[in-house]
Image: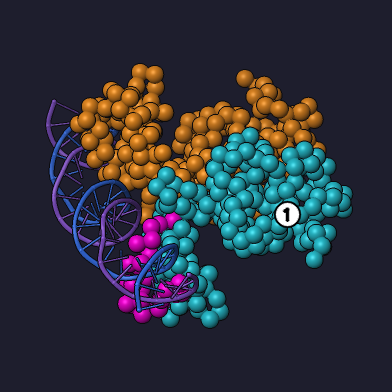
Chain colours: A cyan, B orange, C purple, D blue
Amino acid sequence: MSWTEHTDQIAGLDAPARALLDTLSPMEVPKGAILFCPGEAVKGYVVMLSGQVDVNLIGPNGRDILLYRVAPGQSCIQSTLGLLGGDAYTAEATAETPARLVLIPRDVFFALLDSSPGFRRLVFGAFAERMQSMMQLIENVSFMSVEARLAALILDRSGPDGCLHMTQAEMATAIGTAREVISRRLDKMAHAGSVAHERGVVTVLDRKALNKIVSGTAF
Amino acid sequence: MSWTEHTDQIAGLDAPARALLDTLSPMEVPKGAILFCPGEAVKGYVVMLSGQVDVNLIGPNGRDILLYRVAPGQSCIQSTLGLLGGDAYTAEATAETPARLVLIPRDVFFALLDSSPGFRRLVFGAFAERMQSMMQLIENVSFMSVEARLAALILDRSGPDGCLHMTQAEMATAIGTAREVISRRLDKMAHAGSVAHERGVVTVLDRKALNKIVSGTAF
DNA sequence: GAAAGGCATGTGACGTGGTCACATACGGTG
DNA sequence: CACCGTATGTGACCACGTCACATGCCTTTC
């Protein structure tokens, strides 16, 4: 698949912007690669073409929490932050799957911002979306119980077969808690019959019960 | 002081944008007024001219947490979110002092965004800044102890005389915890000799000790 | 100026959550 | 099979959030 085909995926982009972007070559990163880490300087604006990148905040004691996930067509806001505010990264981005992305250099980014309404909308939209989800995250972390967050996670990441393939450590990161807590909560939920779990897999048994847990402690 | 004088406070604004903004009339809001609340539709882009507005996220059980404070010359990002993403407010903004602000209607906002590089920079800059502080907030809430957050609050909100005029309930909101916890922590800090406290006032006694608490649990 | 009501604060009990220090258990590899 | 790295289970302990009150201080109102 060519890079030009990929620019088509970026919605609402006008022809001049597209032409400019097509002069840049995409970049392949393998699964597990770290795109940037705290303290690193900002190289440009990053747009994902394919794959899945997770952005995490890292705590002093090694605990980390998932800030947001970047899907194809979206951009990584961290880079925008750096470009606009001049600050360095404060989070770490990891490729969860092999990924393909374009890095728009600083000057090209600003040129596009001035010349292309479509590009502006893209950037602004991405910004607004991230901000929303960030506020959602704050809301969840500060007002929802671990049990509710875990139930929500299981519901929306499990496949149609009701299976969720994640280790407890990954789940802990995703909802911002410690692994041990996940272990105990899963036990409790399994005991109540709402899920089953074994090494690396959680299976939904009672979707209704989980929904109830989510809404019970949330609002 | 005229409204036109106020637009001068907004840094980096170009002449055409300024001219357009000067056609809008500013708005006065009294102390304690609620500028918007969760679920309300977005009326436009808001720029503060004077005063102090706090934006809080409200939890189901009445607990709330300070997302950010809007100072003169800054804009309230919540409104931008709504304008760009179409979503309604999810937080509540309260005037902590009497405030004066302009509301830029939706269409004017978009016109400015397309026509004025200066306005774009203003909006983008505000966005980036808020996003940064939002990530900082997540970091603090999830990785710092209550004691460290409290010490930090006392240090950076207390006047040159070392006095901080806030009730325990306000402090609790500011750092995202419960009032009772503040009560106990203040007692502990007072016992250790680092602060003194009475109804509505906390006084810094040992700045070094407080700094140590902040950095001790943070990084 | 005394009574009343509203805030601000102090306190104990209790459950949840995070951390530490381990003990298993499971899966692949040589 | 023995070994090793990773995933998971568990108990102890402390920090924090919540609930239910008890004071205590200040202002309003007769």
Q: Tag 1's secondary structure?
A: strand
The quarter of the rendered structure image containing the C terminus of chain A is bottom left
Type of residue at label 1? Met
Q: Image height check: is B70 above or below B57?
A: above
D6 with respect to B2 (left or right)? left
Q: Residue A187: tell me if it is visible.
A: yes
Residue shown at 25%/33% (left/top)? B189
B138 with respect to A41 (left or right)? left
Residue shown at 33%/77% (left/top)? A192
Q: Image height check: is B95 above or below B43?
A: above
Query: Circle 1 sits on which residue?
Result: A27
* Residue B39 at x, y percent in the picture: 54, 55
* Residue B37 at x, y percent in the picture: 51, 49
The span picked out in magenta is A176-202
Residue shown at 39%/22% (left/top)? B159
Q: Residue B124: tell me if it is visible.
A: no
Image quadrant in which you'd find residue A83 = top right
Image quadrant in which you'd find residue A88 = top right
